[in-house]
Every structure is written in C-alpha cells, then in structure tokens.
Amino acid sequence: MPVAEITVPILWGIAAVSVLAGAFGAMLGLGGGIILVPLLIAVFSVETEAARFASLVAVCVTSLAGSLVYLREGVTDLVYAGYLQLPTIVGAVAGALIGSRLDATVVKVLFAALLLFVAWRLLRAKALPSARGANRGRWMAAGGACLGAGLLSSLLGVGGGLIFVPVLSLLLARPPRVAAATSTYLIGLTAAASALIYARAGQMDANIAVPAALGILVGAQVGARVSRFVPGLLLRRVFAAVMLVNAFLLIQTVLRNG
C-alpha cells in the first residue's frame, strides 16, 4: 500500500487487528504474526514485504511486553531459553537473507499452506503425555527444530512459536504455560535479527509498522495476563477458526492479484 493511501481509519484498523493478534500471540506463545501478516495483506492491501517487516517489529514488541509479565511471575525458563538461543538466531539470519530475495506470491502461498496446517493440527490436537527429562538426543533435536523456527520466522514474518511451543512442551517436557512463556521470550530474538536484515534491504514501512507495534503492545499485555483463565481447548478452536479464515483471505488475494 503506497504511503499516500494510508488514512487515519486504516491506521486505526491496523492497530485494532494488532491488538487481537498480540493477545492471541501472548496467550499461545506464537507472537501474533501468524494472524497479523495475512490480515495486513488481504484486508488492508499492504504489500507483502511491508506486512512481513511490520509483523516482525510487532513480534519483537509482543515478546518484550509478554516477557515482562511472564518474567515477573517467574514462569519463563531462562535456562532452557539460553540453550536454544544460538540455533534460533542462526536460523533467523539465514531465513532473512533468503526471504529478502523471495517473490511475494511465493510468500503468500507458503503462508496460506502454513495456516491450513496449523488449523488442522489445532483441531486434531489431543492431550499428549510429556516426555520425561531432556536427554542429549532431545536437546539435539530441539536445537535443530529451533534452527528451523528461526528460518520460518524470517521467511514469513512470524515469531517461530509454532515450533518453539511443541519443542519446549513435548521434547523438553516443559509445562504448557512455561512453554508459552519461554517461546514468547525466544520469538523476540528471531524477529529482531530478521527485522534488522529486512530494514537494511529497504523493506520497511514505518507507517504500517508503528500502529501494528502499538496494537500488539496492548494486546500482548492483555493476553499474557488472561492466559491462565482461558480453557486451552476453547483457545485452540477459536485460533484454528481464525487460521482458516486468514488462509481463505490469502488464497483469494493470490488468485486475484498474484
């Protein structure tokens, strides 16, 4: 969307959907980008590159705002986060270098496929027994998965929490809320590393990123506080529905504009 077409109602609309994205992101440890990017592209006609950068900035804010709450409550596992930081950042840098050269239509198609996969997994999710302990093999698998999470974050403008949360909860046996809190901390690393590279490549638009970041800031604070009161099954179902709607909107955009 050219700067001249950005009006005050559009800025308020971006801020409003960012509040929703931030709340969901903090509650699930996902960062909110998976909601924000398709809405910016399909509803507000924001260019893919600008939407991705705005989402990464917003994810940084989500991570900061949500982590302030979780750290104060002592929920975030900083020991586990410390071990996973390096592969996460390496993946994020590699993904940003690739993503800055990737065609916008390819990004849209990949994002739509990701949304459909996430919705399917959420609707089929059942309570799984936690793994007991985290041996060397599990740590190696977790490191490889976090490398992929960083790559995914950079390419699509999401926080990587889609991978961090199951890695922490299933592979490394962290309780669900601890996994979400630790993921919220880690997504800030991937988003910050990626956003810096995209900014250097000239793919930033402050007119989009600022209202998105402010909206995310409010939503993340709310989401982190109410997460303890929302039933997990209800949250998964609502989130899956949002993913399906967003996938449909993105596919429509690809078919209409390419």
Image (tube, rainbow, N blue to C red):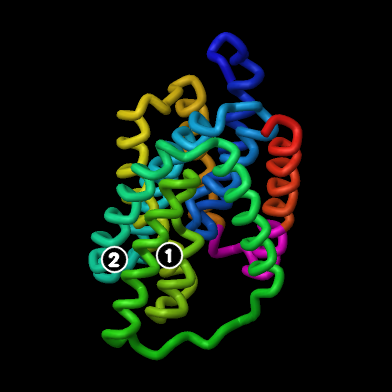
**Magenta residues, as a range?**
227-240
Expressed as whole percent of the image width and height from the top left, the position of residue 238 reads 71, 58
> How far apart in space, not on screen, are marks 1 and 2 (Cα)?
9 Å
Q: Quadrant of the C terminus?
A: top right
Which residue is depicted at the point 48% across and 31% down?
Answer: 214
The residue type indicated by label 1 comes to: Phe
Q: Taking the image as drawn, is residue 104 in sight?
A: yes
Which residue is depicted at the point 64% across and 55% down?
Answer: 113
Is the residue under label 2 in contact with that under label 1 (CB below 8 Å)? yes
Which residue is depicted at the point 71% across and 36% down?
Answer: 253
Q: Taking the image as drawn, is residue 20 in sight?
A: no
In the depicted structure, whether residue 254 falls above or below residue 148:
above
Q: Which mark is residue 164?
A: 1
Q: Quadrant of the N terminus?
A: top right
The residue type indicated by label 2 comes to: Leu
Residue 86: image quadrant is bottom left
Residue 126 placement, left or right of 171:
right
The answer to whether residue 234 is magenta is yes
Q: Mark 2 = which residue?
A: 84
